């Protein structure tokens, strides 16, 4: 990576500070995009505000600009040396979802969060359902990031947890409410939000209503406006692909969180920090220079800065159906950044349930079945922690047994349904003396 390009990009960021600050004060979104919404008419949506967060961080911390420059040089050195490749055999990132709701519809279901986690895991492991839509000339660039995300199984005090917290807030649009010029209410319990869990051990994801049409934002490593903000904030209508996400076309595929976690792992948009210019890079070798965002896969002209752009990149802005890949260079940058800047998170034990602190077995387990279309899986889940063990059966509508397995699980068990033809199925779970059954509809 050319150091001049890095300097140039950071210079652009710095020069834009005053300009962006002024924009922010007037509440004008830099990347406001139009989206026709059948229910609410035309609504201005802003796909991502990670750059705004970065600008705020630069303004709040006078020495940060130089620090980021040094960190970027260090990172580029690590990428070149290949030290990132000496990573552990597997990476599991513990995630806690803080659902902060004012109206009941904002209190999204556990199943919707499971669905999001499945989409996340598929996409970070090159197993997303729309992978085949990547144009053939870019297929050799698709990378398997090989990172798993889990719902946190132990809370900061060492107690068992579902990895989901739920908090009522008296504040409407709590995601965009500010306490003062800098700080946002969502990040503070005393202000109607929820305090983060130690970001050295958890990836914090706040789910709430965000005003102003903003879909999501995230903090970059080493560059938070204030420490409590570290993590991702996502509007409740764009989590996963079921429940409240169903009405959110074209951002109904659970891709927003993938994009925001890309930022959390230090990826910039393909057009680089700021609003885009052919002089600014995203610090990734194999993503071409790009003048700015694409808002649709249908745009016929996909060339800018003298080369064809990868519109299907998770870090671009088109509809969720279009977003399908990270590149090898983005993989190097993410893994290298994790090792360089987020090492404690890689060593977190929060994916594991606490030792000697077995979760209690629910009295009324209230098991439910569902088909997660984007995950391509049948979900068997309970509102209780479990553990549960028994036999799972899948019957077709004629009552023929199609699938059977012996399973043990906490809260959720997923069955790969790729082998099932579209149609109605009955799934049953037998545990000791009880039999639970549910009807599912599999679509393609
Ligand atoms: Zn973004």
Image (cartoon, grey):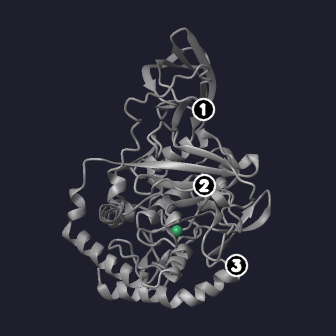
Residue 82, percent from left and from top: 21, 66
Q: Nearer the viewer, residue 299 or 252?
A: 252
Q: Is residue 425 left or right of residue 118?
A: right
Query: Which one is earlier in the sequence, the residue at label 1 or at label 3?
Result: 3
Reading the image, the residue beneath label 2 is 194
Q: CA distance from mark 1 to mark 3?
A: 41 Å
Comparing labels 2 and 1, the label whose residue is closer to the camera: 2
Label disc, if present, on residue 370 of the rendered structure: 1
Q: Nearer the viewer, residue 186 or 19?
A: 186
Placement of 286 over or under 207, stated as above or below? below
Can residue 59 be seen at all in this image of the molecule? yes
Label 1 SS = strand
Q: Nearer the viewer, residue 41 or 25?
A: 25
Q: Residues within 10 Å of mark 2 (few under 14, many from 20)?
A: many
Q: CA distance from mark 3 to mark 2?
A: 24 Å
Q: Residues within 10 Å of mark 3 (few under 14, many from 20)?
A: few
Label disc, if present, on residue 27 of the rendered structure: 3
């Amino acid at each position: 990576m050319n150091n001049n390009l890095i300097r140039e990009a950071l210079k652009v960021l710095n020069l834009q500070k005053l300009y962006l600050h002024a924009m922010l004060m007037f509440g004008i979104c830099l990347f406001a995009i139009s989206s026709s919404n059948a229910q609410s008419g035309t609504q201005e949506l802003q796909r991502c505000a990670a750059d705004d967060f970065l600008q705020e961080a630069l303004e709040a911390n006078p020495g940060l600009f130089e620090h980021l420059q040094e960190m970027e040089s260090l990172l580029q050195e690590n990428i070149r040396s290949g030290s990132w490749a000496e990573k552990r055999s597997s990476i599991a990132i513990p995630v806690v979802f803080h659902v902060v709701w004012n109206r009941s519809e904002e209190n999204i279901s556990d199943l919707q969060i499971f669905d999001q986690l499945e989409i996340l895991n598929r996409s970070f492991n090159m197993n997303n359902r729309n992978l085949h839509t990547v144009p053939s000339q870019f297929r050799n660039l698709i990378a398997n990031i090989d990172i798993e995300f889990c719902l946190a199984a132990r809370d900061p005090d060492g107690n068992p947890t579902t990895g989901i917290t739920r908090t009522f807030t008296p504040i409407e649009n709590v995601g965009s409410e500010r306490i003062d010029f800098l700080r946002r209410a969502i990040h503070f319990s005393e202000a109607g939000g929820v305090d983060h869990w130690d970001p050295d051990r958890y990836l914090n994801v706040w789910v709430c209503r965000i005003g102003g049409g903003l879909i999501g934002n995230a903090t970059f490593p080493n560059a938070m406006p204030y420490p409590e903000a570290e993590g991702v904030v996502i509007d409740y209508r764009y989590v996963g692909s079921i429940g409240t996400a169903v009405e959110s076309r074209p951002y109904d595929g659970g891709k927003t969180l993938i994009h925001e976690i890309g930022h959390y792992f230090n990826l910039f948009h393909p057009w680089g920090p700021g609003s885009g210019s052919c002089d600014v890079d995203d610090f990734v070798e194999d993503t071409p220079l790009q003048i700015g965002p694409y808002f649709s896969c249908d745009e016929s002209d996909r060339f800018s800065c003298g080369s064809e752009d990868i519109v299907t990149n998770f870090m671009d802005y088109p509809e969720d159906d279009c977003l399908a890949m990270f590149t090898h260079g983005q993989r190097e940058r993410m893994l290298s950044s994790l090792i360089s800047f987020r090492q404690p998170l890689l060593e977190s034990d929060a994916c594991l349930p606490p030792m000697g602190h077995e979760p209690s077995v629910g009295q009324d387990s209230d098991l439910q079945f569902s088909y997660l279309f984007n995950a391509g899986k049948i979900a068997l889940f309970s509102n209780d922690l479990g553990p549960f063990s028994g036999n799972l059966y899948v019957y077709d509508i004629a009552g023929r047994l199609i699938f059977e397995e012996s399973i043990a699980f906490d809260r959720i068990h997923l069955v790969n349904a790729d082998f099932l033809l579209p149609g109605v199925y009955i799934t049953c779970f037998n545990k000791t003396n009880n039999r639970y059954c549910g009807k599912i509809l599999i679509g393609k």
